[in-house]
Image (tube, rainbow, N blue to C red):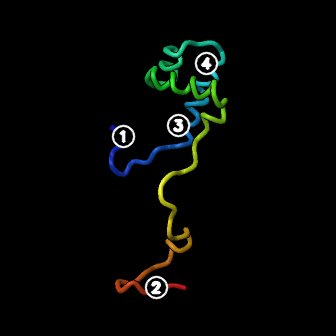
Amino acid sequence: MGNPAGARRDFEALERRRLEAARLLREGLGQSQVARAVGVHRQLVSRWARELSESGLRGLRKAGRTGRPAKFSPTQWSYPVSVDGVGLGK
């Protein structure tokens, strides 16, 4: 289950798939038809349909990233560091 080690999810593509499913549901297609059209299991479309009715499209938009916040800024990640841990750059 899940992604292979090192594989990253395309969160934008996942959101596009949910929004496409919402469009099809609003057009009147059944959950099974929507599931086949977007390539997911019917139970997942059922969950999306419930979220759509409770929260609208906002509920299907991608959520903010979870997990512990980064300790380093992107700029800090780019600094070279020597073996003893002392910065070589700026």
Q: Disc 3 designates what residue?
A: 14
Which of the marked residues, 4 or 2, is nearer the chain's N terminus? 4
Residue type at mark 3? Leu
The alpha-carbon separation of the residues under discs 4 and 3 comes to: 17 Å
Q: Nearer the viewer, mark 4 or mark 3?
A: 4
Which of the marked residues, 1 or 4, is nearer the chain's N terminus? 1
Reply above or below: 63 against 36.
below
Determine which of the numbered discs, if any, sits on residue 25 in the image. Answer: 4
The alpha-carbon separation of the residues under discs 1 and 2 comes to: 37 Å
Residue type at mark 2? Gly
Name the element at disc 4: helix
Name the element at disc 1: loop
Q: Quadrant of residue 4?
A: top left
Q: Disc 1 designates what residue?
A: 2
Residue type at mark 4? Leu
Place of residue 35 in the rendered image (x, y in percent of width and height, measured from the top left): 49, 20
Place of residue 61 in the rendered image (x, y in percent of width and height, measured from the top left): 61, 38
Q: Disc 2 designates what residue?
A: 87
Q: Quadrant of the C terminus?
A: bottom right
Residue beneath the point at 63% across and 12% down: 28
Crowding near the residue tagged with mark 1, few <14, some 14–19, many ≥20 C-alpha atoms within 10 Å: few
Crowding near the residue tagged with mark 4, few <14, some 14–19, many ≥20 C-alpha atoms within 10 Å: some
Residue beneath the point at 33% across and 49% down: 5
Q: Is residue 26 shown left or right of residue 84? A: right
Q: Is residue 81 shown left or right of residue 12? A: left
The alpha-carbon separation of the residues under discs 1 and 3 comes to: 14 Å
Residue beneath the point at 49% across and 14% down: 32
Q: Tell me if label 2 and label 3 are in contact, CB under 8 Å.
A: no
The alpha-carbon separation of the residues under discs 1 and 4 comes to: 26 Å
The alpha-carbon separation of the residues under discs 2 and 3 comes to: 39 Å
Which of the marked residues, 2 or 3, is nearer the chain's N terminus? 3
